[in-house]
Amino acid sequence: MVARVVPVDPFDLVVFGATGDLARRKLIPALYHRLHDGQMPEGARIIAAARRDLDDEGYRDIASRALDEFVEAAALDEKTRDRFLRSIGYVQVDVESDDGWDALAKALPPADGRPRVFYLSVAPRHFGIIAEKVHRAGLSDSDSRIVIEKPLGHDLASAQELNDCFSGHFEERQIYRIDHYLGKETVQNLMALRFANALFEPLWNARHVDHVQITVAEKVGVEGRGAYYDEMGAMRDMAQNHLLQLLCLIAMEPPARLEPDEVRDEKLKVLRALAPLTDPESVVRGQYARTNGSPSYTEDVGHPGSRTESFVALKAEVANWRWSGVPFYLRTGKRLRTRVSEIAVVFKEAPHSIFPPASGRAGNNVLAIRLQPDEGITLGMTIKEPGPGGMRLTSAELDMTFADTLGATKLRMPDAYERLVMDVVRGDQTLFMRGDEVEAAWAWIDPIIALWDERGDRPISYDQGSSGPEDALMLMHRDGRRWREIAV
Ligand code: NAD
């Protein structure tokens, strides 16, 4: 099967912070792939803007090296590389001063109905000033778009401030808040699975679902982002956005249409239905300890007394008719056994067993949606063990791993940013968070963090390479359930 590519209209994309990590690692490779696959049209322009004193050629060198580093060799060909690099220009802009804005205005071709995208790949402290200066310099019109990514605030008040600052210069339909998890192929496939198949919907409720587990486990530590991470912690950095967004996609009602606001209205209802987490036993915070000579969290961030969590596990409840009584267990952490992100919908056991005890036990059916690595969906079933040895039950997985299902030629899984950047150009906000969603997520998270601050206790230590603190296991054991293995 060949992926269908519909080219977008020519656009102008201004990347503020174009020399930074996100731009080099994700944006430049994503745009290259879209050109390579015929989606980014001739005439599309990328204007790289950053503080460094570079000319067009100087930045093209940086971009070319980013391609060598972050694009797989099989996708690199010299003709496309050349075309791609020629579509990029560089403007030196210091966003904190007035320097460079005139040059930026000159570098932008007249909009003439071409969508203009301002991608803010800079530290959040620069978001407000860029929005204001873009507006004041007359660079934006009613068709322009502005793109930002987490952290979208630090708590509800700062998120509201950020929303207010953007809404002073842009309408909500022009603001694209990225949660790159939503750009993942499998996450979109979850919507297809739920809403394009009649099979699951009758089972998708408290009568048939025992519980849901969402795990985002990282093997890496704070990786040079210690100061930033120590301010945030796992709850703000991962749970407030990625985990809650995934929860929303599982728990939301079917929208009437696949339209941005229809989908986002449904997600917002889920966030607003989250029961306040008042039971301290429902949340476990952890911090990785020095393990086999590998430095501890506090050593990594250089803050010996830090009470910031590098792991959090919690039990959430979506208090509505569909989900009443179904726990949603969420966990995320750093320096865990391996890197894996997964959603598991665990169905209830069959109500009555007709099989003799010697047959073994029928397990729960589990729909596992794997986001990384190896994106794919499996459905765990109980079947008869093959052979003449009598009726013995065993478990097997129906594997919907796309690379296999979609044909012999292995389909390259596009990176989330490829999809998301093209959606911005197309003006499709379905996979982007609306301002009120971000605020609703903070409104749920804030009291939990306030409770930690009030109690002043330290996170529980866990060994690096483990599944997190014992107490996180207990969180489920107490309910007679267990986490799925953190394993590839
Ligand atoms: P970075 O520090 O690597 O890059 C920052 C960029 O901003 C650089 O190009 C720098 O030149 C530019 N810059 C700094 N001050 C400037 C000024 N006064 N005027 C003009 N340009 C200036 O940061 P990053 O890791 O690329 O992150 C960028 C944004 O994306 C941040 O908001 C970050 O939280 C977010 N983000 C990054 C990642 C990632 O994988 N790196 C993931 C999620 C979110």
Image (spheres, rainbow, N blue to C red):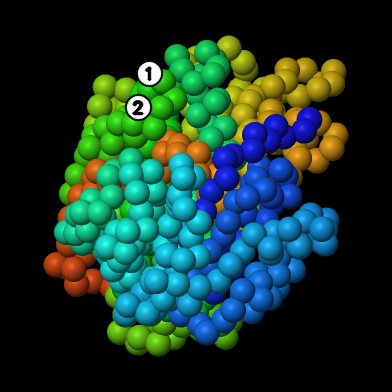
Does 419 sit above or below residue 88?
above
Marks 1 and 2, how far apart in space? 7 Å
Please tell me whether mark 1 sits on a helix, a strand or a loop.
loop
Q: Residue at x 35, y 27 (%)?
A: 262
Q: Residue at x 72, y 20 (%)?
A: 384
Does 383 sit above or below residue 155?
above
Mark 1 nearby-residue class (10 Å; few <14, some 14–19, many ≥20): few
Q: Residue 76 appears at what percent x and percent y?
A: 79, 59
In which image quadrant can residue 316 be found? top left
Please tell me whether mark 2 sits on a helix, a strand or a loop.
helix
Q: How many marks?
A: 2
Q: Residue 84 appears at what percent x and percent y?
A: 69, 59
Q: Which mark is residue 262?
A: 2
In which image quadrant can residue 378 be found? top right
Considering only order in the chain, which callout, 2 or 1, is on the residue closer to the N terminus?
1
Q: Which mark is residue 256?
A: 1
Q: Is residue 209 left or right of residue 363?
A: left
Give the amino acid type for the residue marked by disc 2 in the picture.
Glu
Q: Residue at x 64, y 38 (%)?
A: 7
Return the residue found at the far left: 454
Q: Are marks 1 and 2 in contact (CB under 8 Å)?
A: yes
Q: Is residue 428 left or right of residue 276?
A: right
Q: Residue at x 39, y 71 (%)?
A: 102
Give the amino acid type for the residue marked by disc 1 in the picture.
Ala
Residue 472 showing in the rendered view: no
Nearer to the camera, 55 or 118: 55
Mark 2 nearby-residue class (10 Å; few <14, some 14–19, many ≥20): some
> From the image, which quarter does the N terminus lie in?
top right
Q: Residue 116 appears at what percent x and percent y?
A: 45, 51
